[in-house]
Image: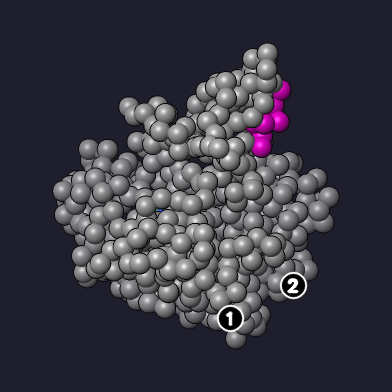
Amino acid sequence: MNPLYDQLFGRHAGQDTPFLILPDEQVITHAAFLSEAAQIAHVLVKAGLQPGDRLAAQIHKSPQALALYAACAQAGVVFLPLNNAYTASELTYFIENSGARMVICDEAARGMLTPIAADLGAQVETLNADGGGSLTEKAAPEAAHFNTVARREDDLAAFLYTSGTTGRSKGAMLTQRNLLSNAETLTDYWRFTSDDVLLHALPIFHTHGLFVATNIILLAGGAMIFLPKFDAGEMARLMPKATSMMGVPTFYTRLLDTPDFTRDLTAHMRLFVSGSAPLLAETHVAFEARTGHRILERYGMTETNMNTSNPYDGDRRAGTVGFPLPGVELKITDPDIGESVPTGDIGQIEVRGPNVFKGYWQMPEKTAAELRADGFFITGDLGRVDEDGYVHIVGRNKDLIISGGYNIYPKEIELVLDDQHGVLESAVIGVPHADFGETVVAIIVPEAGSSPDLKAIESAAAGALARFKHPRRYILLEELPRNTMGKVQKNMLRDAYKDLFETA
Ligand code: MLC
Ligand code: AMP
């Protein structure tokens, strides 16, 4: 028994129906995909990986990258996908912290990663965007059948790193049950069947593209048009061949900015899902006016997978994230005392259910601070439930910026900026941005009598942090606004700079 592998993958053994459809129309069947995954699983086991070991992968999106995920599930290895944008210093932390025994990267990164991995006792294999590399070379002669390693529902299936308010990323431990229960619920709630063809342009190193989109299609036995990345023109070209699409709000605003994206192209579609960041009500309205489709917005997190969703059949309300999913309990509490607030009042959102993760890897204190003993997880989002039961997210109790669906924790950037010559302190904020929803702005306070070199600061940030975290604007201020407790009042800064990118 290996519930995750058996339910998502194994059930399609011998099935010659399409699973992945590539932009050049090449089709990979479920059976062919599983054979490749089995061959990779042999490589992992021969390399000495044991059930429960972690495998870190910073690789391009490709059918083979997905087969690696399946291979890990089959061999009982914990899959740890990493954003392609992470720099060497970010990667070092993830490999070290997770204790990964194997690292899979693009050939171009092998030189940089080999010494880091060697220091940390991890082996390195390569997997390139075209599916080539040492991993698939080693897999090619292996048998296309692999005896699935037994695992239990409570065993770990994946680690996803998520940053925190202290700046250190935390490895969210996701069990087989977390992933499987959520995929089952969503497949049912959103009515996915083997007739579905999902237009897939999300990255596969985060919850949305991997555990929501991919797991649902696997469970339903459907197919995905598998694009290497989002490109509005490609989406418009391929949409008539799809039945459904999932995206972050930036996908929707960019599609609306594409004149070729017309109602006709969406005639065959049955479902558009949005999540990972707030979808503006105006985008919801404009999308319906253009296509006749009402986007279904849902709400989730790395630690919990999906928590709430607008209804499939009922009223999909713009500006809301719908109802708690079946099996998920949601309550709104007072952040100070943790008690539920009266219906309609704003408070912090807490959730409990089979979707909620097991905790942060080797961080019992952080786990205890967010995951209550009774199983409720404190999301850090602020919201309210209206009289019809719809959940509204009204803000965040955590200092988080979401840019184009990527989470950015200001503290991580502030720590880099504060270290720079001539910088006394800094405050990093998110401001509205037409394309990314929010974007990063850094406020720098110089040390007395010095004038920091902003170019040097920018390049230090570039060396340390992934591109999507780089401040898009630097502002020098003599001092930061503080309240009487001495706490930086970021809301005042956000207000002062809210129009910086108004015309972007
Ligand atoms: C790319 N860049 C970004 C960025 N993505 N900068 C800020 N925020 C982002 N999200 C950088 C590029 O490196 C580039 O740098 C510049 O910004 C502009 O690039 P672009 O070509 O316009 O970006 P593009 O490659 O098209 O990517 C934009 C995007 C992509 C929105 C398509 O970011 C994306 O696919 N986002 C999805 C993220 C996601 O899957 N989130 C789910 C998390 S799970 P330069 O050097 O050229 O200026 C989760 C839980 C849940 O949150 O509920 O789902
Ligand atoms: P991550 O940590 O990357 O998984 O991001 C999770 C966070 O994304 C949540 O805590 C929310 O703040 C945000 N989020 C996800 N979906 C939505 C949504 N539909 N509306 C608003 N915020 C969302």
Tag 1 residue: 153
Q: From the image, which quarter does the N terminus lie in?
A: bottom right
Side of 230 relative to 195 (left or right): right
Rendered location of residue 449, percent (x, y) = 68, 13
Rendered location of residue 130, percent (x, y) = 55, 49
- Amino acid under disc 1: Glu
Secondary structure, mark 2, is: loop
Q: Which residues are magenta?
A: 415-421
Name the quadrant containing residue 174. Answer: bottom right
119 lies above or below 37: above
- Amino acid under disc 2: Gln
Tag 2 residue: 50
Side of 349 relative to 311 (left or right): right
Rendered location of residue 255, percent (x, y) = 29, 44
Question: Residue drawn 40% across and 65% down?
Answer: 341
Which of these two is toward me, 341 or 372?
341
Which of these two is toward me, 278 or 427?
427
- In three-dimensional space, the C-alpha distance between marks 1 and 2, rounded to whole angstroms, equals 17 Å
Side of 115 relative to 332 (left or right): right
Q: Residue furthest bottom?
A: 1
Side of 462 relative to 386 (left or right): right
Question: Residue drawn 49% across and 59% down?
Answer: 335
